[in-house]
Amino acid sequence: MEIAKNKRAYFDYDIQEKVEAGIELKGFEVKAVKSGRINLAGSYVLIRGGEAYLINTDIPPYQAKNTPEGYDPHRNRKLLLKASEIRYLLGKAQEIGLTLLPLRVYLKRNLIKLEIGLGRSRKAKDKRDLLKKRSDIREIREAKRK
């Protein structure tokens, strides 16, 4: 079951590969994420010191009055990956122009998973071409319905 999707990442980047990872969350954050209160816009994945982190993801508190003092909804969250997967992603991310992005958050057997994508940034012309292609497909679908 999909909880959240980073639509902007699919528009701004050409996704080359995808990897699944777990997220280290606190108990009240788990409840918030399962209720759909997570925002992936503007977030990215960073590998530092042999560990992967999810940076700048917004998880607002599940119950605002019941949240511990000093809770930062934009805190860095550790990603649960094997060491070999981290080394692989680090090697790929060091290639020119590749970025690690969170694509979507979903439930898998009641566990919260994050799909990480290796993406290459699109140029403005490529984005315009993509929009034109989508509008053409939409027009064809509407013509078929009539």
Image (spheres, grey):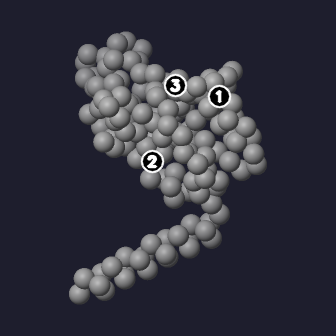
Picture coordinates of residue 133 (x, y %)? Answer: 49, 75
* Residue sitting nearer the eye, 79 or 135: 79
Tell me: residue 68, above or below residue 129. Answer: above
Picture coordinates of residue 99 (x, y %)? Answer: 64, 45
What residue is at 33 percent from the left and 17 percent from the top?
27
Place residue 36 in its image quadrant.
Answer: top left
State which mark lies toward you, 2 or 1.
Answer: 1
Picture coordinates of residue 137 (x, y %)? Answer: 41, 77
Picture coordinates of residue 121 (x, y %)? Answer: 64, 55
**Quarter of the image with the N terminus in it:** top left
The type of residue carrying mark 2 is Asn
Place residue 95 in its image quadrant.
Answer: top right
Residue located beneath label 2 in the image: 6
State which mark lies toward you, 1 or 3.
Answer: 1
The type of residue carrying mark 1 is Ser
Residue located beneath label 1 in the image: 84
What residue is at 38 percent from the left and 31 percent from the top?
112
In the image: residue 76, left or right of residue 84 = left
